[in-house]
Image (tube, grey):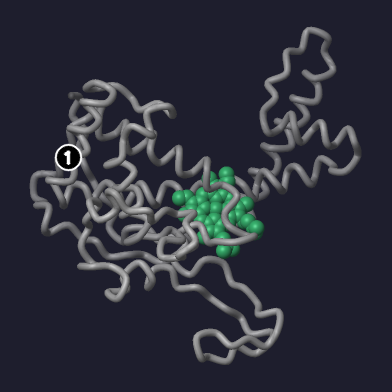
Amino acid sequence: MIVHSDKLLNLFGSMIDERLQSRKSRDLTTSNDVLDILLDIIEGEELNKTHIQHLLLDLFAAGTDTTSSTLEWAMPELLRNPQALLKAKKELVEAIGKGNPVEESDINCLPYLQAIIKETFRMHPAVPLLLPRRAGSDTNLCGFKVPKGSQVLVNVWAIGRDPSIWDNPNSFIPDRFLGSEIDVKSRDFTLIPFGAGRRICPGLPLANRMLHLMLGSLINCFDWKLEAKISPNEMNMEEKYGIAVHMATPLRAIPLLV
Ligand code: HEM
């Protein structure tokens, strides 16, 4: 981990130097991206290069595995649930035309795709215990005493499988979200894969968009089949716990151009 972090820090260091160099040249057309904004702040001397290197490392570390593991779970759930896959394909063909990649502006016209992403978050939250918190004062929470200083973990995985909240909690049923107000930002805290409140994941808007673009495009541009010896109901859906939860046996699916 340390070796990889050092490699990434060096890579970010050279990207920053390169950008600083190009900002000095007269014919510069700024890209006004995240790095440019951070470098504007450096010029105001509130940040230095090391801060930016570590900030970029944080964003990459927090954003990569979480987004990819969500997509990694959405695909096998769809392959195990051909009806849902078919419904998503139909919606995509009608909204954006067969074989086209999904654009950001299409997302609002794709309620079923949105429901699939929510259902994946419910069953497979990438960070199942969120990040540890410490109680700032003695607290009484639903009849439980939480003494000041205790470490608190929020079990989002268990919330997503709680039968008092969800019908058939262990079944992948995207339709449950159609016409429902429940959202990853809603205040009833039933679907909180990104956490909630002041420390909610700052990458939420990016991750949510990326997931719709990637999953929608994978569904609309390809037909998918499993390897010859595997049938949908025999797929191994065991989880492997790490910083993010991955499939214990990675999915091997074959794309066929539509
Ligand atoms: C599906 C994708 C993602 C999921 C499920 C996810 C989930 C989370 C969760 C649960 C937390 C902790 C919230 C808490 O403390 O209660 C978190 C924090 C964080 N996430 Fe994400 N995240 C995702 C994508 C991203 C992306 C794409 C980025 C950045 C580009 C990102 C950057 C961060 C950062 C910097 C923090 C720490 C925030 C803080 O400490 O205040 N995440 N994320």
Query: On the image, which quarter does residue 121 sit in?
Result: bottom left
Q: Residue at x 45, y 54 (%)?
A: 184
Q: Is residue 220 above or below residue 116?
A: above
Q: Position of residue 157 (x, y in %)?
A: 39, 68
Query: On the image, which quarter does residue 101 sit in?
Result: top left
Within 10 Å of the Cα at label 1, are there few (<14), some (14-19), or many (20+) other Cα atoms? few
In screen coordinates, is 133 left or right of 14?
left
Q: Nearer the viewer, residue 239 or 183?
A: 183
> Which residue position is annotated with label 1?
87
How many numbered marks have been drawn onto this rendered protein structure? Answer: 1
State whether residue 169 appears in this view: no
In screen coordinates, is 127 left or right of 36?
left
Q: Residue at x 27, y 26 (%)?
A: 95
Q: Is residue 231 above or below residue 208?
A: below
In screen coordinates, is 147 left or right of 225?
right
What's the amino acid at mark 1? Lys
Q: Position of residue 222 (x, y in %)?
A: 22, 30
Disc 1 beta carbon < 8 A from ligand 1? no
Q: Residue at x 47, y 62 (%)?
A: 127
Q: Position of residue 175 (x, y in %)?
A: 22, 51
Determine the quadrant in which ligand 1 lies: bottom right
Task: Residue at the far right: name it.
Answer: 45
